[in-house]
Image (cartoon, grey):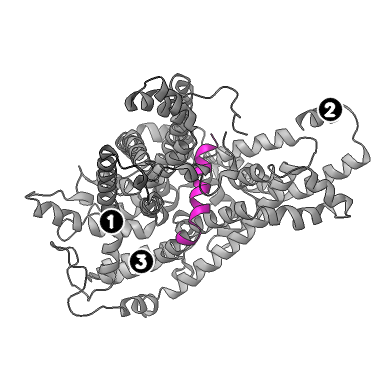
Amino acid sequence: MARVETFGKGQAEATKPTFWGRQSVRGTLHAVFVYGLLVGLGIVVLMPLSWMLTAALRAPGEPVYTIPVSWFPTESLHVQNFWTVLTNPAYPLWRPLLNTVMLVVLNITGVIISNTMVAYAFARLNFPGRELLFRIVILTMLMPYVVLMIPQFLLYNTLGWYGTYLPLWVWSFFGSAFFIFITRQYMRSFPRDLDDAARIDGCSRFGTFWRIIVPLSKPVITVMAVFTFQDVWNDFSGPLIYLNDPAKFTLAIALNYFRMTQFSAGVNTTNLLMAAALMSTIPMLVLYFFAQNSLIGGIASVGLKG
Amino acid sequence: MTAVVRKSKRRRLTGMERKEAIAAYLFLSPWIIGVLVFLVIPIGMAAYSAFTRWTIINPPPRWIGLENFREMFTEDRYFGWSLGVTVRYMLMTLIPFLIIGLALALLLNQKLRGMDFFRTVFYVPAVVSGVAVTILWISLLDADVGAINTILRSLGVENPPNWINSARWALPSVALMGLWGVGGGAIIYLAGLQNIPNHLYEAAVIDGANNWQQFWKITIPLLSPTMFFTLITGLIGSFQVFTPAYIMGGTSRFGGGSRYLRFYLLHVYVKGFQQGRLGYASALAWVLTIISAIAVIIVYNSSERYVYYEEGGEGGA
């Protein structure tokens, strides 16, 4: 039933009858009802983000949540708020931003290299023990993070990795069960002749993998990259546990750190806080709009793999 | 393909096959090393550490048998408490979010124009999750100047709740934030809905089934595996709520963190990393793992009654 080939939109789209095509009164009423509900709910859903935007552009201390809603700050747009949070001498956020970007790049690199390799072996090579090892992949996929939180700390601490970035990216170069699973499913869908043809043309095993299988797997690689971006960018508990130097913080914990310092200083800086929060969500939003189909398709296939 | 592997177990590998097997294990090596180093060793350490006094300040672990578990069940007053918080949150969100997500998916599955646009809109909160969103909601839920209470007051509610800072509304605050992201679940249901073959509905219409009957006899049974999947992941997920609990709880006026937001995983964190008692925290983590495994098994075993799998369906892997 569920295949990873269903990335992107379903084919059902093409056969949809358009609403404007059928002119019955009942159809019109139905459409008005559905659109009304969707628009109403859509406004409710977008409201908090719009508030974040308008709050980020206000002067210090200016009230944000008023009835009726005032979308535009009274005197002027405080675009400089973004600059202030990036460079304010007390705790400039440009560093955490760079730290996070670095971690995202390292993790995506590791995830792509390791998982395509492992998935290739599972999907397209015959070897003794394949079924057993794949069962272990499935088993580790079900392992909840909480069991590993403390023991991984014990391990990394013993290795002397506490306070460094190592616990936050090294693992990505060793494959992760879920990505192995979806990539393997995807790679299995290519015709078997591909490998044989490549062999006959004198391509080595690694050459087949690198020149044929990897380029064909671009959709699933995109999904992995997007998921990893999202996970690393939003990861809170990992950096919270392993990083102790504010200069090394990632954006997620830096945001909270920034909030706590403002909080204990007793200043009302909702505007700066919202500017910082918005800044940290913009990359996710941009990524979402560009990689929407592979992201939603990927999530949908996750839900279907049952 | 399976047959080939089975056969090859019995006889010796030919030269070609051996070459292929060696190549395969080379490709697999990162994962095999990874499982050993990042999974087997930590789990071994975890099993051992749960029976020790192992602290950050005083590293050499000391074997204390079942002492950690005894403390948990008799002295640690936040053990049962945090479990209670977690279970209440589960009751508040698991089934309600499933129903709301399904309703939203049904709405998005209407064959009308512009549904892709709405799908995009409802999924946005699930994309931006994390610290920024929690900080945003703390601001929205502020008792005095927050958006929610401003709206409630304008609607004539005289004493709107104190949300995060109140005993009664702290947990619903987290749930409200979760509700905002319910579109994430809806997308999964939507994909499930679109996988239901149209001819089933056509046949039902010919047989004279109305919309209500179609919904209960076709949509729900064929969607039940998807619903079951989200139920299981939701179950495991609610045992692991951390970020909102940590950030929202820390803002509250109850000293080092609101006890009304002391979710179980937060309790593990407090014991392990704030108090530095790694052995004890490890024991706590094991108990959580066992509890969530039991919960999953119960749900899984009862699923035969209400999850419908198509005959001859390709069962997962």
Of all chains, the one bearing label 2 is B
User: Same chain, marks 2 and 3?
Assistant: no
Q: Are marks 2 and 3 in contact (CB under 8 Å)?
A: no
Q: Is residue A300 magenta?
A: yes
Q: Chain of mark 3?
A: A
**Residue at x 36% of width, y 79% of height:** A83
Q: Label 1, secondary structure: give it.
A: helix
Q: What separation in Å lies between label 2 and label 1 (alpha carbons)?
A: 59 Å
Residue A272: x and y in percent read: 30, 72
Residue at numbered disc 2: B7
Which residue in the protein does label 1 denote? B137
Q: Is residue B204 magenta?
A: no
Position of residue B308 relative to residue B112, above or below, is: above
Quadrant in which residue A124 is drawn: top right
Task: Check if mark 3 and mark 1 are on a common chain.
Answer: no
- The amino acid sitting under disc 3 is Leu
Q: Which mark is residue A117?
A: none
Viewer can see residue A282: yes
Q: CA distance from mark 3 to mark 1?
A: 13 Å
